[in-house]
Amino acid sequence: MSTPMRLTTAFARLCPKRETLRFAGILLGLGGLSTLALPPVHCLPVLLLTFGALGLILNATQSWKRAAWAGALFGFGFYAAGLYWLVYAVLIRADEFWWFVPFPSLGCALILAPTVAAPAALCCLLPAGIRRLSAFAALWTLFDMGRTFIFSGFTWNALGSSLAVPGPVGSLLIQPAAWIGEDGLTLALVLLASLCGAIWLEPTALARWICLQTGANHTPAPSLPDLRKRVFVCSVSGVLLWCVAGNVRLSSTHPTGEPGPIAIMVQGNVPETEKIGRQSPRDIFMRYLRLTAEGVHHAQALQTSLNKPGEHFRPIVFLWPETAFPGYDLLQDSPHARQIIMQWATGADAGIIGALRMDDSGHYRNSVIALAPDGAMEAVYDKARLVPFGEYQPPFIPLQIVPQGGMAAGPGPQTWHLADIPAVGPLICYEVIFSGDVVNSHDRPRWLANVTNDAWFGNSAGPRQHLSSVRLRAVEEGLPVARAANTGISVAYDGLGHMIDHLGWGKTGVLVTALPASLPPTLFGRFGQSIPLALCGLLLLLAGVPRRPATRQSVAPSQKTTMH
């Protein structure tokens, strides 16, 4: 064989076949298309197409390896598209890290893709049909919950957050989170989308085309019309029951106990380039002082209007966003700065300030500091869940990509009991995405204070996805939430997930809101992640129960079904 022929043969062996490219392209596309269901788009019907098509492919394959590849490609497309906004954080310092631009979104997708590949492979242990897809929904949810153990945890974009549609529709749809949590919502969505989508797609030309292009064996079930009717009735009944349950909770659950404080959320709207460059710390400091004074003035007027004869005035608390303090020294070492802050906030009963601090061992911590009216530090909370590759660097990475090797983590959820203030649970930025891990289970607070800085991620889907997590935590725990964000979106939610007020992206100002009382402890608040774990285990158990063998008269050997 001549040298050119050898090179041509070797090149042909290295290049993927057309069938492989089509298989990969369709699965990547389906995964990417699924992100339209996530905030801020909330296009839920797209899941019937994408998860339905994935269900068809999983049902048609007999190879767990091929199923694993299908899941991995779907997951890669889902996470790469859903986390596209991570690139904004690199672009802020593109002059230094231009080479790192492709890695945040694609790197995270590569790390997270196995959490979809594993459920796709494992569900092939069961016969094709409803049992296999039910197992897939349970396994998807279990591996999705398992993301909390990847590095310092990364549970962003759980599919259940798709139900947090802005407005009253979303409030209705997310109420079951008070019983089953966000992961329970994910389980319900994947189960409904996979089963209904696969069954409704199966007899269509689109299903035949998808199976043809991906090399799957498309054999529609003879009993499909009856099966479609049964699944349709069950699905519609389930959705109606879901909505009725949500409406019952909305109408029958009421706040109890003392009302929350009057919260002032200060939104300084400081560009991230200005913060990291430390170009004008004094101007930033003065901006926050003026906004705080303005907020306290409005809060005192609200305090007077809400006061009833014989009652105490409601306390006033102001919140500065994550790492808002821009001083030349750390806030913990600046008693004069603390006094100045509280002098400008005269009339406030406490201030909650996002600031960096250094511990006794010389490690930096991302913290919030509670200030008393005289400027004394009343309490300190250190962020426990650090952002992978931003605040936390996995030890196996040889290059130092996080300054000083990262920050030190705090011990976990706390409850502050500040003077004259209802008990509050502080949360910093990223921590609010962790369902079931935002409240001290032994000391339930009356409200949650979340400070964040989403300026890193620009005016993209990222801040809106973050906001949906805040809303879901309010419903899961039955607690009102006050959220101060540097560039927005600052917001206040009640314990039912209703938005009380908000200050939009890119605006400078203050949001002054009287927080309501908390709701009674929720079922999910009491038992946490054990509830969705139990639901997944039950579904797997039911999926694994063998069916009774069909009689000879009912199904002929040539009538092997795809969905049963």
Image (cartoon, grey):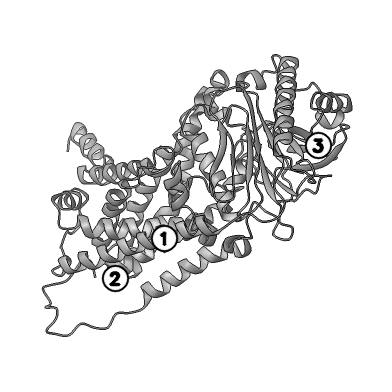
Q: Determine the CA span between mark 2 and mark 1.
A: 34 Å
Picture residue at 50% right of the left edge, 54% below the top: 182
Q: Position of residue 362 (x, y in %)?
A: 82, 36
Task: Tell me if label 1 and label 3 are in contact, CB under 8 Å.
Answer: no
Using residue 444 as the reference point, say whether residue 36 is left or right of it.
Answer: left
Relative to 508, residue 261 above or below: below
Q: Secondary structure at mark 2?
A: loop
Which numbered disc flags the more N-terminal residue, 1 or 3? 1
233 left or right of 483 in image: left
Q: CA distance from mark 1 to mark 3?
A: 42 Å
Q: Which mark's residue is nearer the viewer, 2 or 1?
A: 1
**Residue 349: numbered disc:** 3
Task: Estimate the x, y position of residue 340 in percent, counting from the top left.
Answer: 84, 23
Q: Nearer the viewer, mark 2 or mark 3?
A: 3
Amino acid type, callout 2: Pro
x 53%, y 21%: residue: 94
> Front-most of 365 and 419?
419
Residue 161 can be seen, yes or no = no
Amino acid identity at mark 1: Val
| Kind of element beneath mark 1 | helix
Which residue is disc 1 drawn over?
A: 244
Where is mark 2, residue-wise? 127
Measured in 3D between alpha carbons, the distance from the residue under mark 2 to the one under mark 3, in whole angstroms, is: 63 Å
Image position of 118 with respect to 403: above or below: below
Q: Earlier in the sequence, mark 2 or mark 1?
A: 2
Image-based side of 478 in relation to 117, left or right: right
Horizontal placement of 386 versus 376: left or right? left
**Mark 2 closeness class: few <14, some 14–19, many ≥20 residues within 10 Å:** some
- In this figure, what is the number of numbered marks? 3
